[in-house]
Image: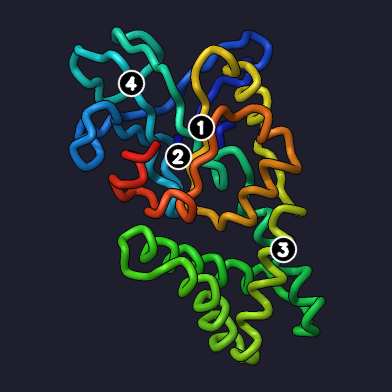
């Protein structure tokens, strides 16, 4: 599930009623790379790279509804593939906190919200290039800060060291979206829940090990370990 905060996807009474209620969805009937057991679902689109939702649906023989999924339609889910950053976790808030802390650490002065937004735009554009197969993860992690520093008049030779400190802080600054943990807990044991992420392996493993996420997911799939980045069909073939 991708596309925005889980709190926008479910009803506010999800934790109380133990129900998983999808509010705003529409289906893209084209499966991923010909994988017929995976269907895209998009919901509450944001202006970020988090616009693809994926649910595994077995079995489903009826027509694919275009909008307004409220449950039913002869569908039964045996697994849910959850994105983490931007869906369960408020990545923008974590990004902001980590960036501000690193500015202080490196003596770069105050990082304004305008600067943060500019960094975020650069970061998103590079992650989209990664997803299209135009850059490797190793390249974009440093390149995002090199481009950002060049625009801000900061020393670009500090980009690699800055990124290392930034990555260390991301797991320490995480914030859950409302109802995220309650939803995962309500679904535990009812469906197989998997984390599917393009995030860096070291950061994502810390998020799993140092928060309740690790005990709520049945499986963790990180692109670095899988050997392919979402939405490459090879990633989902492994899943």
- Residue 83 point in image, percent of width and height: 50, 40
Residue at position x 45%, y 39% from top? 2
- Label 3 sits on residue: 168
Q: How crowded is mark 4: few (under 14 residues within 10 Å), some or many (20 or more)?
A: some
Instruction: Identify the mark at residue 38; answer none if there is no mark.
Output: none
Instruction: Identify the mark at residue 194; answer none if there is no mark.
Output: 1
Secondary structure found at label 2: loop
The first of marks 2 and 3 along the sequence is 2
Picture quadrant where residue 15 is located: top right
Residue at position x 65%, y 21% from top? 185
Alpha carbon distance from label 4 to label 3: 36 Å
Q: Is residue 100 left or right of residue 86?
A: right
The first of marks 4 and 3 along the sequence is 4
Q: Quadrant of the C terminus?
A: top left
Point out the frontmost of discs 2 and 3.
Answer: 3
Residue at position x 57%, y 71% from top? 119
Is residue 215 visible from the viewing direction of this image?
Answer: yes
Alpha carbon distance from label 2 to label 3: 24 Å
Q: How crowded is mark 1: few (under 14 residues within 10 Å), some or many (20 or more)?
A: some
- Label 2 sits on residue: 2
Display coloring: rainbow
- Label 4 sits on residue: 57
């Amino acid at each position: 599930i991708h596309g925005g905060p889980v709190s926008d996807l479910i009803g506010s009474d999800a934790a109380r009623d133990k129900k998983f209620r999808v509010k705003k969805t529409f289906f893209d009937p084209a499966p991923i790379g010909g994988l017929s057991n995976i269907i895209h679902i998009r919901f509450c689109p944001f202006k970020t790279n988090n616009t693809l939702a994926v649910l595994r649906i077995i079995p489903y023989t009826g027509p694919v509804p275009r909008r307004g999924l409220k449950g039913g339609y002869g569908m039964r889910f045996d697994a849910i593939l959850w994105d983490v950053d931007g869906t369960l976790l408020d990545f923008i808030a974590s990004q902001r906190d980590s960036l501000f802390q690193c500015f202080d650490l490196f003596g770069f002065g105050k990082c304004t919200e305008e600067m943060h937004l500019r960094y975020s735009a650069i970061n998103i554009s590079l992650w989209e290039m990664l997803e299209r197969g135009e850059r490797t993860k190793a390249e974009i992690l440093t390149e995002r800060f090199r481009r950002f520093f060049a625009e801000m008049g900061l020393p670009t030779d500090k980009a690699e060291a800055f990124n290392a400190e930034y990555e260390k802080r991301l797991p320490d600054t995480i914030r859950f979206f409302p109802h995220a943990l309650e939803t995962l807990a309500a679904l535990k044991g009812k469906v197989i829940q998997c984390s599917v992420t393009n995030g860096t392996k070291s950061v994502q493993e810390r998020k799993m090990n140092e928060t309740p996420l690790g005990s709520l997911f049945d499986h963790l799939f990180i692109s670095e370990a899988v050997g392919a980045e979402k939405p490459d069909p090879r990633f989902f073939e492994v899943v």
